[in-house]
Image (tube, helix red, strand yellow):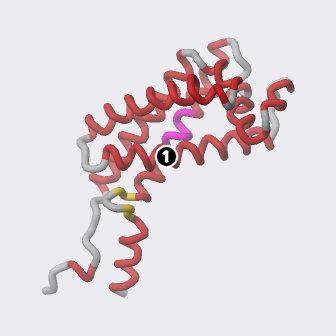
């Protein structure tokens, strides 16, 4: 029994970072930022499916952007998959940075990290994905800020609500 609890502790944490909290933060942030993109795209005069096509084109190829952006389950699945995987990777990195920080510091660093990702994604990755240029707008900035703030808040909050427990083998007896 003690061995199982010790193994869970080892798989839950990478160094000091709570991997479950980081993964949860990445999923929440992916959903929140995608909602921002989809809800605000029409405000920019763009079809709500267009951001999904741009994201899906990373794995499906830029040719799909020539088609009218209509609902297509394959495109939606590819876009959500790419967005989720990248969100998880970046959330693990951000979680390592904000580990053991206050909520305000975690949110502030998350905001800055989100802005840094906006610049990285929409200015540097355009060499690989030239269609990302179309995402250079206030909606893209806002979506990245929402992502960073979400990871910051969820991860730091999870550390407070679910603090790291010492393995049973290290707990005092009696």
| Residue 30 appears left or right of 160 | right
User: What is the quadrant of residue 116 in the picture?
Assistant: top left
The number of discs equals: 1
Q: Is residue 16 above or below residue 26?
A: below
> Percent position (x, y) of residue 108?
31, 31
Residue 161 is covered by the magenta coloring: no
- Going 64% across and 26% down the picture, which residue do you hit? 126
Q: Quadrant of the N terminus?
A: bottom left
Q: Is residue 127 above or below residue 12?
A: above
Q: Residue furthest right?
A: 67
For this rendering, which residue is in front, 39 or 83?
Answer: 83
Name the residue carrying label 1: 26
For this rendering, which residue is in front, 86 or 149?
Answer: 86
- Going 44% across and 50% down the picture, which residue do you hit? 92
Instruction: Identify the magenta region.
Output: 25-33
**Label 1: element kind:** helix
Q: Is residue 76 above or below residue 16?
A: above
Prevailing SS of the magenta stretch:
helix
Q: Residue furthest front?
A: 127
């Amino acid at each position: 029994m003690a061995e199982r609890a010790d193994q869970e502790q080892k798989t839950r944490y990478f160094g000091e970072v709570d991997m479950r909290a980081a993964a949860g933060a990445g999923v929440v942030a992916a959903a929140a930022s995608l909602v921002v993109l989809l809800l605000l795209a029409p405000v920019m005069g763009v079809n709500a499916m267009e951001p999904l096509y741009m994201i899906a084109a990373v794995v499906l190829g830029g040719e799909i952007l020539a088609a009218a952006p209509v609902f297509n389950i394959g495109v939606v699945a590819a876009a959500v998959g790419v967005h989720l995987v990248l969100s998880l990777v970046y959330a693990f990195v951000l979680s390592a940075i904000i580990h053991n920080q206050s909520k305000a510091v975690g949110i502030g660093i998350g905001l800055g990290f989100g802005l840094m990702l906006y610049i990285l994604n929409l200015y540097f990755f355009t060499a690989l994905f030239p269609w990302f240029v179309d995402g250079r707008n206030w909606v893209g900035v806002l979506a990245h800020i929402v992502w960073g703030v979400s990871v910051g808040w969820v991860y730091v909050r999870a550390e407070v609500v679910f603090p790291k427990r010492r393995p049973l083998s290290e707990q005092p007896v009696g």
